[in-house]
Image: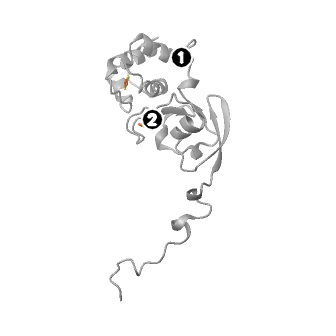
Amino acid sequence: MTNDPLASQPAPTGASAGNADGPENGAKVQVSLRINGNDYRIRIDPRTTLLDCIRETVALTGTKKGCDHGQCGACTVHVNGRRVVSCLTLALLHDGDEITTIEGLGTPDAMHPMQAAFVACDGYQCGYCTSGQIMSAVALLKEPCGPDDASVKELMSGNICRCGAYPGIVAAIQHVRKH
Ligand code: FES
Ligand code: FES
C-alpha cells in the first residue's frame, strides 16, 4: 500500500513518451511551397506555422508576427488568391498552394496600386501592421463589399493598427476602389 497518487498509473509509452518518428525527435517533413512565383522545396518541423515558415525558413520578413494568435492580421498573406492569417495555419497544409506575400505584390520602384495609395493617403505610421493591412486590402478588392467606408471598415476589422492609422487606411482602399 502506498500513498503516492501516481503509483497506480502506467508508465508513459508509445507516442505519449516520444515516438521515434515524432517531432520530439526532430523528424521533419518535406513540403513544396510556391511563394511569389518561386518554388521552395523545404524540410520543416510538421508543427511549423505558415508564418514561421515564411519568415524563418524562407526568410521573407515582410510578413509580420503581431499576436501569433489570429487576432491582429499582421501576418496576412494570400493563399490561392484569398487572404489568410498565416499564424493560424500549418505550412504543411499548403503543399502546392500559390502563396503571395507583400514582397510579391510590388517593389519600391513598381508598387502595387494599393501600396502607392497607402503612401499617398498616409495609411501607416510605424508600419508594423502595414503589410498585413495591404494584403487584406488587396484581397478585399475581389470580395463583396459595399461602396461606403463602413463596409470597408467591416471587412478590414481583422487588421488591427496600434497607431490608429485607420482614416488613411480606409482612404487608401477607397481611392483604389474608385480609380
Ligand atoms: Fe497572425 Fe496576429 S500574428 S493574426
Ligand atoms: Fe503602426 Fe499600424 S502603422 S501599427
Q: How is the image coloured?
A: one colour
Q: What element does badge 2 sit on?
A: loop
Residue at far bottom of view: 1
Please tell me which of labels 2 and 1 falls first in the chain. 2
For label 1, the residue is 112
Instruction: Residue under label 2, please give it.
Output: 65
The percent coordinates of residue 80 (x first, y second) are: 57, 34
In the displayed structure, 141 sits above or below 29; it is above
Residue at point 57%, 11% (across, down): 109
Quote the CA–CA distance across marks 2 and 1: 22 Å
Up the image or down, 9 lies above or below 140; here it is below
Q: Is residue 149 above or below residue 160?
A: above
The amino acid on which the numbered mark 2 sits, given as a three-letter code, is Lys
Residue 9 badge: none
Report the residue at 37% width, 15% height from top.
Answer: 171
Quadrant, the N terminus: bottom left
Amino acid carrying label 1: it is His
Q: Nearer the viewer, residue 104 or 153?
A: 104
